[in-house]
Image (spheres, rainbow, N blue to C red):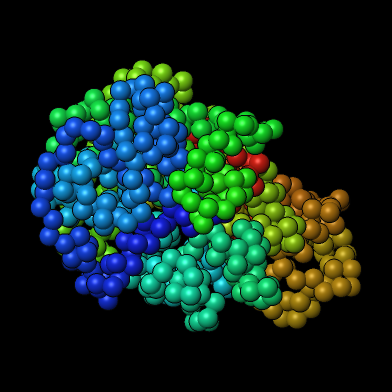
Amino acid sequence: MRTMGRLFRSTACAVFGLAVLMLAASPVQAARAFSDLVGQVSVGPVQEGGALQAPYLTWGGDVATFMANGGLETKPDSIYGKLGLQVNLVSGDDFAAQVQRYLKGESPFLRGTVRMIGMASEVLSQDPRTAPVMFLQLTWSAGDHLVSRGEIKTLGDLEGKKIVLQRGGPHVGMLDDVLQAARLSWNNVDVVWVDDLTGPGGAAARFRDDPSVDACLVISPDMFALTGGLNDRGTGQDGTVKDARVLVSTAQMSRSIADVYAVRKDYFEANRDQVERFASGYLKASEELVALKKAFEKGGSAEYRKVLQMAQDIFGKDVLPTLEEDAHGLIADASFVGLPGNVSFFTDAGNLSGFGPKTEAALKLAEERGFADSAGKIANAGLDYAKVASLGSIQAPAQTAAPAAKFAEMSPSDLFPDDPVQREAAEENIILTFTVNFEPNQSEFSAAQYGDDFQRAVEAASTFGNAVIAIGGHADPTLMLRYVVEAGMTKGILTRSGASGDYQYALNGEPFDLADPDAVHQAVKAGTFSGGVQNDPMRTLRALEQLSQDRAQAVKTAIVDYASGKGYRLENSQIQPAGVGAREPEVAKPSTQQEARQNMRVEFRLMKVPVEAINAGDFDF
């Protein structure tokens, strides 16, 4: 079950966002809202002696912290106990209060998402002692959804649309990622801010009550209430909204929201070994938690049930009423990254969803959306991961390479279906589409000419880590149409009437529209115009399909080479070429060379894929 986690974890973001809202009515006014929220706090040294205080959030990734510690207080036989740590875990769901304790020195640690820390960066960096040093990634988050009305087909259709979301909550960053993928800015959409993450004052309620709202960003329970399910459309019954559907989800945007720990700069410089032990213990616990979860899902695990019970005891039965559904669902909604993910996130310069790009985007967002007048800085701890692995006897390999062939190979008919009914169904899975055109007989695609498009593709592949980028090669049907007419009239099965330029055709006495690609394609493929003719349209059809497949493959090769040349990390199986031929022309019956050139294109489709098409590893990185 991956439905409830975001509701719980987002408590921290909700508290932060609501407080900002109460202090500021507009994004610009919100520039000082976080400062006002925290108030005047005297920076103090981190308290020495006794247990180390560390915050946690109500989120599945933090269950591994409980495991490492043996509960809220360190047990001697726990992972942290054996590492020589003594830690008291305290709730950090009130993010402003968490920052206050951090500044005062009550805790050296800060627990949030990259964007939460970015929003607070101005306050955190005002004193060099408290400048945040990010040292641990826990998870990538799932369970967030962009729900839209039926007329919105892809992310590109959001331009000019009214989108509702909670101010300061987890969906601000998600929308920022969506807009970047669609090559839109915040000025291209009409943002409607609401008070709450969920409930009567939340985005889902506004979407339901206000037909002028085109889309909303919501957590899983609200998504289900609006649409009926991740792959469903609302019927208008049982509280759902007619034709509402999930346009995109963090089920596909698996690299959008990163959960992390940061530490005060002064504490890190004086106690690097302690920080390394804290990170090592967490990663060891996450490794054990993932193994227990797998055992539980296979046939049950008494040890895992103990972990679920601990999570319920700490978070409370009001948050986790049941173990199997709610507590397990909370953990299942968190994609643990483990040691390999931390190595990739913090050290791999080619990871477009790594520390550098993510923190840069967070700081930029903080300024542009008014959470800071001038964003501060977030430093990379640069831990010694060999030492971290050794401290915790961590088994997972410290490597940055993604698993080979993460995505199963899909057939061209899955990506660009031939059958019109199947095509309509497949179009429901398109998240984003964009095209590049090419010249007649072009077989090479250089980065000099198409670099911007290649960059867009690799960025999308990184953020949308559980989606496929289908590359469809399209060809112009003009020559095939000419041969259809020649062959049909030669065989006596095609007749035409009317004046030149406005001919009307009939095939075996029935109207036959050359501007209907499906009708033409099906007739040619059936061999209707073959046999006894000099220029067989079927040969041309097959040649166009092979030509378009070769072009699609050439574009994939060019993208892979581009990514390699830039040092970007790219999962090659995520990019899948398909020869579409002349089945889906932009202009079905070209009458000019300019119209014919519109058909000579390569189309990029960012697509949802079935879960079984993804070879998921234990750790998601």
Q: Residue at x 41, y 23 (%)?
A: 77
Asked if residue 225 is positioned above or below residue 8 in the image, the reply reads: below
Which residue lies at the image location 33% right of the left edge and 64% below the top edge?
17
- Residue 125 in view here: yes
Query: Where is residue 586, by image quadrant?
Result: bottom right
The relative height of residue 156 versus residue 333 in the rendered view (above or below) is below
The one of 279 and 140 positioned closer to us in this rendering: 279
Camera sees residue 481: no
Q: Quadrant of residue 79?
A: top left
Spot occupied by residue 348 in the image (x, y as percentages of width and height): 34, 32
Is 518 positioned to the left or the right of 74 in the image? Answer: right
Q: Name the residue at 84% across, 53% down.
A: 527
Q: Where is residue 563 in the image (x, y as percent from the top left)?
A: 40, 37
Report the number of discs. 0
Which quarter shows the C terminus?
top left
The residue positioned 68% from the left and 73% from the top of the image is 238
226 left or right of 70 in image? right
Q: Position of residue 416 (x, y in %)?
A: 65, 53
Q: In the displayed structure, would residue 47 be above or below residue 474?
A: above
Q: Which of 575 and 612 is in front in this view?
A: 612
Residue 32 appears at what percent x and percent y?
Answer: 18, 66
